[in-house]
Structure formats: C-alpha cells, structure tokens
Image (cartoon, grey):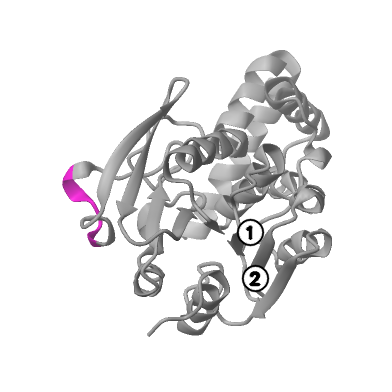
Amino acid sequence: MKKLKYFILTKSIGLYINSLSYIRPKKASHLAYRLFSEPRIGKLTKEKLPLALQDAKTETFYFNDNQFESYFWQGNENVILLIHGWESNASRWEKLLPYLKKTGSTIVAIDAPAHGLSAGKEFNVPTYAAFIDVAVQKFQPNFLIGHSIGGAACVYYQHKYQNNNLKKMVLLGAPSDLKTLITNYVALLSLNNKMVQLLENHFLQKFKFKFDDFSGQIFGKSLTIEGLIAHDIDDTIVAFDEGKKIASSWKNATFIETKGLGHSMHDDELYQKITSFLVGAKR
C-alpha cells in the first residue's frame, strides 16, 4: 500500500510539473530543481546529537551566506576528512570511526549543506565542494573519504581546487554522472522532454554546466593523487557501473568490487583495507 501511495504521489507531482511547464515554465523549472535538491531527512539538533558525535569537538564555519558544522577528533599529524552523502550527516561514519581512531589520526567530519547541523534547504555538489575547501583550509587534511554523493563531491573538489597537499582519497558507492541522477529523477516523476530541457537550462544558468559535462569520469582524468574506489555490485541506490566509470579515468586509483554490502558499504574487512591504504593498519 505504501509503495502504491508513493507511486501515485510521485506521478501526480510529475503531472503537475509537466502541465506547469507549458504555462509557467520558469516556475516549473524552479519547482523541479527544488524537489531534486532539497533533502527530506538527515537534519540533526544539538540537543539530540547521535552518540558517535557526542565526544567530538564542534566548530561552525561560514561560506558566503552558508553555515556548516564540523566535528573534530584530535590525533596525530595525519588528518582524515570525512564527507557523507545525500540525506545523511556526519554520524554515518559511526562504524568506520573506531578503525580510523586506532590509526591515531586526527579525524574531521562535516555536515553537508542542508544536512546535520548545517544550515540551508538546498544541496548541490558545487556548494558542498566549497564547504570542503573551507574545511581543508582550516584542518589541512592529508586524506579524504567520501560516501555516495559525498564521494562525487570529493572528486569534483579535487578536480576544481587541485589541492597539492592531499595525498589520498577513498570513494565508497560514489556516483559518477549527473546525467544518470537526472535520468533517474526524470523517470521517477515521469517528466516530459520539455521539462527536462527546462531543468537543464536551469542548471546551465545556475552552475554554468550541462548535465553531460558534470561527470566524475571526466573529472577523474585530472586527478593525480592515489585513490581507492569501492563499490558494491548489489548497490540499488547508485549503480555499480558508476564507480567503474570513475575508476576508468583515474589512473592512480584502485577499484574494489564488493558484494552484499549494498549502498551503505559498512564492512569490517573493507574498513581494514581503507585504513591500510591510508596510513597502514595498526592494532
């Protein structure tokens, strides 16, 4: 019954947007973009922080009119910056944190735009990358770990900002192509071709790029640091081929295929491989 209600709701919204595209195209494109870019879950409150974040020092940063939150665990000179994905927050690293702490490293995690304790309602990768850059300038990380769209943001960040101090990057279940995400969104709402063009025009005006141009596979060509890309063949959120696309163009990246982990990628063996890749395993 829930699936039926969800199906009817999404198709009804799509029908409304399609109809609106003929009479008020600008409003239609803004509505379609808003539904695409506003997370429904993932927010936190300071009064009810998840247990994984309660022992961290917190600091609020600002980028233009945006406010975002960081979490900090002091360690040695090795600094690891954690970048979570869509409709999540910094607490998603709860199961990986013990492995990273065993290495003695300093660990930093941030909440994405419109997630966790960070302000705003809109999420997009360019703004997320700008958040990452602010955190990088403050904490000077050697390593980045990104999950899902957070992984895509890491790739775009390094492509755009070319951080020479960054040594290694880990991507978990990361999508490559914006076009793929848009195609899935269009199919979910059954948007018509006119609406798709309006949406692309909106992206072009707002971000100065077309759907086909925003691709981890393209950005990967400019990456020279070492990389570790892990993707699960049973991932039903981000297709396995998306991870392979990024790996195909990133010359210094190693690809790990997993099975049975789904999109979360929580796994003791994988986490041991990640810590060994970054700073060497310590018991």
Q: Which residues are magenta?
A: 47-51
Who is closer to the viewer here, 192 or 154? 154
Q: Residues within 10 Å of mark 1 (few under 14, many from 20)?
A: many
Whole-percent x, y for residue 5 in the image: 50, 51
Badge 1 amino acid: Ala
Residue 156, by quadrant, is: top right
Q: Residue at x 52, y 41 (%)?
A: 132
Q: Residue furthest left?
A: 47
For disc 1, the marked residue is 174
- Is residue 102 toward the left or the right of residue 237 in the image? left
Magenta stretch: helix, strand or loop mostly: helix
**Furthest residue in direction front, as rendered:** 77
Three-letter amino acid code at the position of disc 2: His
Say which residue label 2 marks.
Answer: 231
> Closer to the N terminus: mark 2 or mark 1?
1
Quadrant of the snapshot with the C terminus? bottom left
Which quarter of the figure has residue 255? bottom right
